[in-house]
């Protein structure tokens, strides 16, 4: 069984600005308590 979770928020910003922030993995720890760390893997794409 696959569990599905959905959350929505209204932002006072254009979608492009919001996406640029939330998709920046280097800043994920600023707003996600689950993000304990991370690093970019060299030589990997996709």
Image: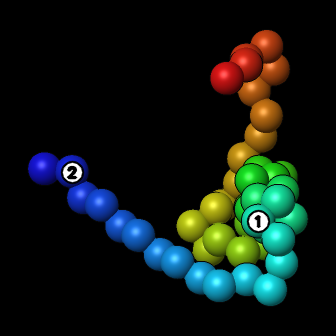
Point out residue 26 in the picture as x, y percentages from the top left corner: 83, 52
Q: Is residue 40 left or right of residue 35?
A: right
The residue positioned farthest toward the left in the image shown? 1
Q: Secondary structure at mark 2?
A: loop
Say which element carries label 1. Answer: helix
Report x, y in % for residue 37: 71, 54
The answer to whether one can see residue 21 in this image is no
Above or below for 39 versus 20 = above
* Callout 1 crowding tier (Cα within 10 Å): few <14, some 14–19, many ≥20: few
Q: Disc 1 to disc 2, how far (Cα)?
A: 28 Å
**How many numbered marks are there?**
2
Ranked by sequence position, the earlier of labels 1 and 2 is 2
Colour scheme of the picture:
rainbow
Is 24 rendered above or below residue 8? above
As drawn, the residue found furthest toward the front would be 14
- Quadrant for the C terminus, please: top right
Q: Where does label 2 land, which residue?
A: 2
Residue 13's spot in the image, x, y percent?
Answer: 83, 78
**Is the residue 17 above or below the residue 10 in the image?**
above
Evaluate whether residue 19 shows in this view.
yes
Residue 20 relative to residue 37: left or right: right
Q: Picture coordinates of residue 36 (x, y %)? A: 66, 61
User: Picture quarter containing residue 4?
Assistant: bottom left
Most foreground residue, 10 or 23: 10
Image check: 30 left or right of 1?
A: right
Identify the residue at image location x=80%, y=86%: 12
Of the pair 24 and 12, the residue shown nearer to us: 12
Residue beneath the point at 74% across and 53% down: 23
| Nearest to viewer (mark 1 / mark 2) | 1
- Badge 1 is on which residue? 15
């Amino acid at each position: 069984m696959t569990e599905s979770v959905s959350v929505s928020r209204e932002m006072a910003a254009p979608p492009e600005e919001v996406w640029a922030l939330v998709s920046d993995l280097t800043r994920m720890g600023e707003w996600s308590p689950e993000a304990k760390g991370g690093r970019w893997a060299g030589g990997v794409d996709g």
